[in-house]
Amino acid sequence: MKRALHSGIKSVLQLGMATVPRSVYTRLVPQDVIGLCYHTVSDEWPAHVAHICPFKSSTAFRDDMVWLTGNFEVIGYEEACRRKSSVRRSRSPAVVVTVDDGYRECLTVIAPILQELKIPAIFFVTTNFIDNRQLFYRNAASLCIDALDRLGDSDQQATARLITQSQRATDADIPAIRQWLLDLGPENGSSLDATCRILGIDVEAFLKQRRPYLTRDEVRSLRSSGFTIGAHGTAHCHLAGLPHDHLEAELAGSCHTIAELTGDRSVPFAFPFSGHRVDRASVTAIRARNPHVGLLFDSRGILPAEETTVHRISADTPPDDEASRRTVLPSLMQKSYESELRQQWIAPLKSLLHVR
Ligand SMILES: [Zn+2]
């Protein structure tokens, strides 16, 4: 009897989760402002991004934006600041569109669509990448995987053996090499350089010819078109566990570079990778000492509201079927709310009722 009751309650909770409309989600998990986080949008194959991050076509991104403006109030950075500091709470969140990493497609693909639809946005730029001065190690890893994928079977096996001989850290098995490349960090620069050489990737030529990142002039051009430029660290490293002065250099230093470039007094900051386990007391002290550091943006989905942080939902995932012309944004947003709803309401309720 007890087991039947528990299984009944569990079914009701699960059914409820699947059928809760958006207006109820947004009421149960109140947020004044939420963000959408994109990285790049491209109609061509971006070999430097494709293996580390999903991406949408310009059509799919446009479909997202059309749906978004029809269903939410879409606001820019200044309005987001105003709402975060206001004591009045709104029933439905306003949405900020953001794009991380400072890829050139911000200017060539994303900005024209946003301008056509009159949507404001924040572009978070990693300051060491501006002007294509250096290649992000994750982009180098993606280029290596792409080059490996393009080889014919026998060349691929021979190259895999060469990589394994040069880097004893991995097996000569293609999935293992892919994973090894994806797991490399900034401290593994020599391994990445060696693998690029084996695969015939000329990093300097790639930076010069493909120009993956925005230049200073392009950043200024986006700013003068009315978009906000934010900082995303100097080197796109994990900030959790960094010594305080290093954290300050990444956070305040990158905001300072953007402030000098744009002339803005307050520069928003998006945590590279995520703000998970980044010491909030240190961040608060750094913001107090550096008033040009503006609102913070995290990318772990919907979390309990914080006064100085806008929580963002990853929105890069493309639709399964491009031809269907259906945006995946409603389901991405629903999943993110559902996950937080589970944390805030369902898990405690289940534990109260001893339902597993
Ligand atoms: Zn990033």
Image: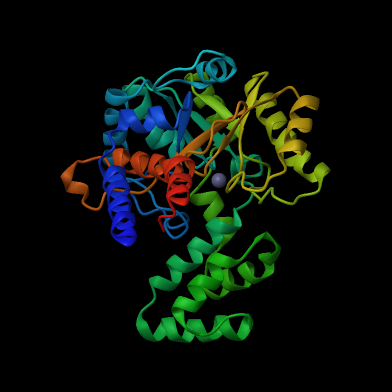
Q: Kindly give the residue lying farthest to the front in the view shown.
A: 1
Quarter location, residue 38: top left
Asked if residue 136 is positioned above or below residue 182 in the image, the reply reads: above
Quarter location, residue 332: top left
Asked if residue 140 is positioned above or below residue 248 in the image, the reply reads: below
| Residue found 72% across the figure and 43% down from its top | 279
Q: Is residue 162 left or right of residue 58?
A: right
| Residue found 73% across the figure and 36% down from its top | 283
Residue 50, visible in the rendered structure: yes
Residue 25 x, y percent position in the rendering = 36, 33
Asked if residue 159 is positioned above or below residue 268 in the image, the reply reads: below
Residue 320 x, y percent position in the rendering = 25, 53
Instruction: Pick whichever, 129 or 265, lies toward us.
Output: 265
Q: Is residue 68 left or right of residue 170?
A: left
Residue 111, visible in the rendered structure: no
Which quarter shows the N terminus? Answer: bottom left
Asked if residue 126 is positioned above or below residue 31 in the image, the reply reads: below
Residue 131 x, y percent position in the rendering = 60, 40
Instruction: Pick whichever, 58 or 232, lies toward us.
Output: 232
Instruction: Pick whichever, 261 or 59, lies toward us.
Output: 59
